Image (cartoon, rainbow, N blue to C red):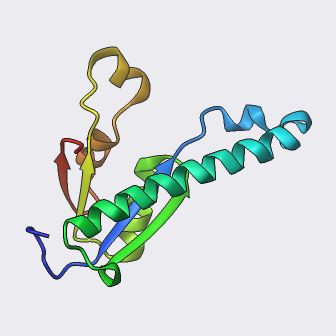
């Protein structure tokens, strides 16, 4: 950890389920929703394990590493974690999308930079 060697880190994977309110009918709420939820949880677990492995490769000790997975709009989830953890710095990777894609999907990085909860460092994804 070259920026803050004694810092504790919080890995957050926030995800948003689009049109979730329209999916809550009786038919969907049954077996399909359960199977989809299990697949999503397995995917998120694998992604978080990959992030943790990368952190260990970079020399970050497990005791300095917190992790969480939250459903919800990513910017709001990041703000909530910043507040609860008393964060000094948010590091976020950006997809670098522009034009129509950004207009449709938005940008978590831009939203954070417009009204930062603390210092924000935007990087290219590894």
How many marks do you count on the picture?
0
The foreground one among 117 and 1 is 1
Name the residue rendered at 34%, 79% in the picture: 62
Name the residue rendered at 29%, 60% in the picture: 54
The foreground one among 40 and 92 is 40
On screen, residue 85 above or below 114: below
| Occupied quadrant, residue 50 | bottom left
On screen, residue 24 above or below 38: above
Give coordinates of residue 40: x percent, y percent: 62, 46
Give the quarter of the figure containing the N terminus. bottom left
Name the residue rendered at 34%, 75% in the picture: 65
Give coordinates of residue 87: x percent, y percent: 29, 71
| Occupied quadrant, residue 61 | bottom left
In the picture, measured across the screen, residue 29 lies left or right of residue 65, that is: right
On screen, residue 58 above or below 5: above
Give coordinates of residue 28: x percent, y percent: 84, 36
Give coordinates of residue 119: x percent, y percent: 18, 61
In this view, the residue farthest toward the top is 100
In the picture, measured across the screen, residue 49 lies left or right of residue 53, that is: right
Give the quarter of the figure containing the C terminus. top left
On screen, residue 66 above or below 91: below
In this view, the residue farthest toward the left is 2
């Amino acid at each position: 950890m070259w920026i803050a060697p004694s810092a504790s880190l919080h890995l957050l994977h926030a995800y948003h389920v689009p049109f979730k309110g329209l999916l809550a009918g009786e038919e969907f709420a049954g077996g399909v929703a359960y199977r989809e939820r299990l697949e999503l949880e397995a995917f998120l677990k694998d992604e978080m394990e990959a992030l943790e492995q990368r952190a260990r490769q970079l020399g970050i000790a497990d005791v300095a590493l917190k992790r969480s997975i939250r459903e919800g709009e990513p910017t709001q989830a990041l703000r909530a974690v910043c507040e609860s953890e008393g964060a000094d710095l948010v590091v976020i990777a950006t997809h670098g999308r522009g034009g129509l894609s950004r207009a449709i999907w938005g940008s978590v990085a831009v939203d954070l930079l417009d009204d930062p909860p603390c210092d924000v460092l935007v990087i290219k994804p590894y």
